[in-house]
Amino acid sequence: MSADSLTHWGGEPVATLRELWGVPTVEAYERLSSTNDRAKELAAEPGHTFAVVVANQQTAGRGRRGASWHSPPGSGLWMSVVLPSAPALHLPLLVGLAAAQAIDGLEPTERSVRVGIEWPNDLVVGSRKLGGILCEGAGDAAVAGIGINVRTPAGGFPEELTGRATSLEEQGAKAMSHNTLCGLIVSALERLLARPSPRLEPEVLADLRARDALADRPVLTEEHGPGTARGIEADGALVLERPDGSRVRVLAGSVRPA
Ligand code: BTN
């Protein structure tokens, strides 16, 4: 393990977090290139399903489609979890839903935060990005990387994110330790992935649809061009209504509000 590994995280011994969360492994780091990279190494060894890797700072945090992910020290929850099966179309949606439900589970304040999901991997509040999900294959398993902006970084978000990013703090969520939020996400993930299936269960799909931040909005998709987003299907596809009224299933590529 690297010299930057921690025996305590958020004031708790890492061994206690492992027991509390009921997972085989918890690794915490002050600094790591990317928690997904370390989780992939764990996934290559037996016995690490639901292993959790967290870092206070990532020096080479990755976003979807080769983007870098701004991961300054202490301002966000940067975590990865080794999952039991290979990535499927609906996996980032399930992981995003776990994060959204975990945030709902924080003690509410006068302004409780309602987290939306922008297909396929963004966590949003209104039109601002609160976090993102990066699911990657790791042999027969998958690694789910989750980044959530807990506080607004001391000097603000970098210029390219100004006006596009937000944090739980900015949204008035109750201040909580990163390990509390991480534990809530891990238990939501265990619950949502308890019965692996290529199709989302009806109540899971209902929650996703209720959080679908693109529903009935004009969007521009990389795969099929412009149209109106018409909801998420049980296998995780996004339905796009094209300008001529025909409908297609979006399976890949970027989708952004037009
Ligand atoms: C995105 O919105 O493009 C996905 C962002 C995913 C960021 C998280 S932070 C923890 C994990 N480690 C990484 O390098 N990336 C993910």
Image: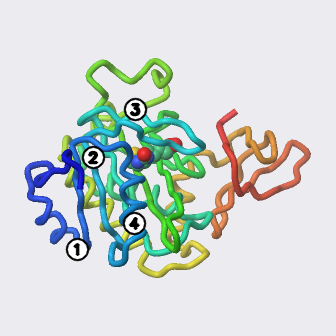
In what element is the residue under mark 1? loop
Tag 1: amino acid: Gly
**Is 103 placed left or right of 4 in the picture?**
right
Residue 148 lies in what quarter of the image?
top left
Foreground: disc 3 or disc 4? 4
Residue at the spot 69% in from the left edge and 53% down from the top edge: 252
Foreground: disc 2 or disc 1? 2
Tag 2: amino acid: Ala
Q: Mark 4 points at which residue?
A: 82
Quadrant of image for the N terminus: bottom left
In what element is the residue under mark 4? strand
- Kindly tell me whether mark 2's CB lies below 8 Å from ligand 1: yes
Mark 2 or 4, nearer chain start: 2
**Is 125 placed left or right of 185 in the picture?**
right
Inter-mark Cα distance, 4 to 1: 14 Å
Inter-mark Cα distance, 3 to 4: 27 Å
Inter-mark Cα distance, 2 to 4: 15 Å
Query: Residue 243, relative to residue 24: is it above or below?
Result: above
**Mark 3 surroundings within 10 Å by alpha-carbon count, few (fewer than 14), some (14 through 19), many (20 or more):** many
Mark 4 or 1, nearer chain start: 1
Q: Position of residue 26 (x, y in %)?
A: 23, 63
Q: Name the residue under label 3.
A: 166
Whether tag 2 and tag 4 are in contact, CB under 8 A, the answer is no
- Kindly tell me whether mark 3's CB lies below 8 Å from ligand 1: no
**Is 227 placed left or right of 114 in the picture?**
right
- Kindly tell me whether mark 1's CB lies below 8 Å from ligand 1: no
Q: Mark 2 points at which residue?
A: 55
In what element is the residue under mark 2? strand
Query: Residue 38, relative to residue 88: is it above or below?
Result: above
